Image (cartoon, rainbow, N blue to C red):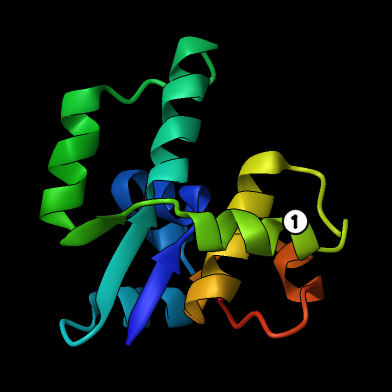
Amino acid sequence: MRVLLDTVAFLFAIEDPDRLSRKARTVMGDPANQRELSVISLAEIAMKNAAGKLNLSREDTMDALRRLQVSLVPYAEAHVLELMRLPAHHRDPFDRMLIAQALAEDVPVTTCDKEFRKYKGLEVIW
């Protein structure tokens, strides 16, 4: 199964895996599952680093992707078109882009953010 990690789930997996739910740890720990992170999350990490809200170097981020066997996925036209149809349940622009990407790709999202559950057709793993 493919699963898209939201930024917070990725950060929890790096810094404190016990903060992940039992279900999220099980899904992420199953070698049969394809763990993915959007390039949108990388942009969010970069911006939080620049604002002093996060201290995760480029090298540490790339090392974590390798260690956790997480693949990066690009953000494409189909994702933007889905974003244009998305209802305004959530105000965070990064999360809205991840939701649109997951819906367009028909892939579940691993997130603790309850706002994600408001989007019809989006499977949330937590």
Number of marks in the rendered image: 1
Relative to 75, 103 lies left or right:
right
> Measuring 29% from the left and 69% from the top, which residue is drawn there?
35
> Measuring 42% from the left and 67% from the top, which residue is drawn there?
4
Q: Is residue 46 above or below residue 78?
A: above
Image quarter where the C terminus lies is: bottom right
Relative to 11, 88 lies left or right:
right
> Measuring 60% from the left and 53% from the top, which residue is drawn there?
80
Q: Is residue 42 above or below residue 59?
A: below
Image quarter where the N terminus lies is: bottom left
The foreground one among 23 and 4 is 4
The foreground one among 20 and 31 is 31
Residue 83 appears at what percent x and percent y?
A: 69, 57
Residue 70 appears at what percent x and percent y?
A: 23, 59
> Measuring 34% from the left and 80% from the top, which residue is drawn there?
2
The foreground one among 6 and 13 is 6
Q: Is residue 48 above or below residue 29?
A: above
Residue 60 appears at what percent x and percent y?
A: 19, 31
Q: Is residue 56 above or below residue 28?
A: above
Which residue is labeled 1 in the image? 84
Give the residue type that dot 1 points to.
Answer: Met
Secondary structure state at the residue bearing disc 1? helix
**Within-10-Å neighbours for mark 1: few <14, some 14–19, many 20+:** few
Residue 98: quadrant of the picture = bottom right
Q: Is residue 112 in view?
A: no
Relative to 40, 65 lies left or right:
left
Relative to 110, 57 lies left or right:
left
Residue 119: quadrant of the picture = bottom right
Q: Is residue 41 in view?
A: yes
